[in-house]
Amino acid sequence: MRIVHFAKFGPRSNGLYETTKDLVLAERKLGVDAQLVDMDEKEQSRVGLKDGEIITAHPDIAWDADILIRHSVVPSKYQNIGKPVIMCLHGRPESSYRISATGANEVIQAVANKSVDCRYKAYVTFWPEFEAAWRSLVGDKLYVIPAPVDLDYYTGGEDKKFSGSHKILIADIWRDDVIPLNSIFGAVRYIERFEPEAKIHIVGAPVSGKQFEAFKPFLKGLKKYIGSVSGQMKEIRDWYASCDCVVTPHTIATRIIRESLAASLLVVAGAGCQYTPFTANPNNPDAVADAIAHALSDSEYRNAARAKAELEFDSELSARAMIELCKSITEKPVTKRKVFLDIGAHIGESVRRFYRQRPDANEFEIYCFEPDPEIFKKLFNNVGAMPNVHCICAALTAKSGQRSLAKGHINQGDGSTLMPGKLTGGLSGTIPVNCQDINEWLTNANGNFDYCVVKMNIEGAEYELLPHMVSSGLMSRIDELFVQFHSLKFDTAGRIEMDKTELQWRLNMKKYNTKVFATTKGMASFGNS
């Protein structure tokens, strides 16, 4: 199995990346070909970036993947290649809501919209505490996978010989909705009440900009309690190795909690955190001070901290759960042969929409018919490499042979037609194109199928093709028919005859069980069936 993860590269500075890297490396240990692709917001890739055993791959590797896992940006080009997608929800619902509400990034809306996109087969959260919130957006597609951490990496670390009889670490990133000021105040109360010679060491503090200007007066006022202050850093494990406990307001398994436990560091967390016995309401400095005192007095708990990390956050457990989820998506047995005929495929818009709207799209053999050789090249470039898509440069009609196609010159030729009298589409000039009898093609080339979906958008030629499908008996083999009628785009004489043909066809269709979705503008949703 090949799994391709899309995530922004950011060694030791990006929690999303670290979680992704842990998964990739653990999946490889379990025999999976796991790869990492870096894409930025402008859908530009960065290939060949190295972080130990991780080397970022070219995004075209997605073509050979069994499944794509989205941690950050997956360009539409790769979402539309017929590969199932899993989206990992790294953010916290509360912060995601804040970001959406301010208009900075419509995170909540994007997740909700993707929940009905059938290319997205599953959503993953690494925090069971968020399950209810995310499930309200994506429903039964949500899965909880344990948050991973690199246990081996965090057993290392060099003691930096910090000052203080006990060293209290504050290491949370300063977020828009959770900042560790209360953790600092709780540590100050501990020093005042229990241990005047202890020191606070701060990592991840703001070092520039407005946040730093707001924090600077606190640093000045608390100078006697603070041993050292640093911004974000890549070798935070040295700080874990140098300190006696970490204080955080969080209750979920953030990177700080996972990494600290893996480093056998005592953790004082927010009330309700299930990963440490030392918890307190972060808004109550005296309660935090009591929890710190309790932790530092329990000299035996360091071994239990490491054991907790091994039990809860072993990256191989996380990878095993992710692999099982991928297998459940990619190895579903197909008991019927399903065929989708895209008649008038143009440049592949319907195939992409079929994948967005049909959860079983990858179970179909998809045949795209486009007669214009120039447009066919674009069709093939867009969808031809999808594993279940076959592109055929011909028109499916009532009779095999060559005919003249009047070329449309609007919207990449989507108004081209085999029928005379069409008034729209910017028609100019004709070209000879190949035509294949639909009954002959289906019967001789692809006769044995169990289920057939037909999409037909052929700019007036439907008035020839549909009656032929009835008279030849082919309609009895079509399970779903999506057709757009175009009589309104023809001259008056043509329109009258076309409307008569359509009425007779609709009367004849009453004897069939075919589900018909007919429109005069746009195509009906494939999800309606």
Image: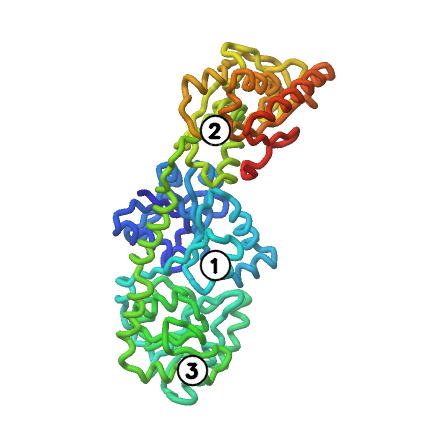
* Tag 1 secondary structure: loop
Give the colouring mode of the picture: rainbow
Crowd around label 3: few <14 · some 14–19 · many ≥20 (10 Å):
many
Residue 91 - label:
1
Q: Which residue is drawn at 44% across and 81% down?
A: 288
**CB under 8 Å between discs 2 and 1:** no
Mark 2 belongs to which amino acid?
Cys
Q: Which of the two discs, 2 and 1, labels the residue nearer the N terminus?
A: 1
Numbered label attached to residue 419: none
Circle 2 or circle 3, nearest the eye: 2
Residue 506 in view? yes
Tell me the CA gap for discs 2 and 3: 74 Å
| Residue placed furthest toward the bottom | 193
| Residue 238 makes an appearance in the image | no
Q: In this view, does 157 lie above or below 433?
A: below
Quarter the N terminus occupies: top left
| Above or below, comparing residue 345 to residue 15 in the picture | above
Residue 246 in the image: state x and y as whole percent.
38, 74
Identify residue for label 2: 452
Confirm or deny contact between disc 2 and disc 3 (CB under 8 A).
no
- Say left or right for 6 vs 416: left
Per the image, the residue denoted by label 3 is: 225
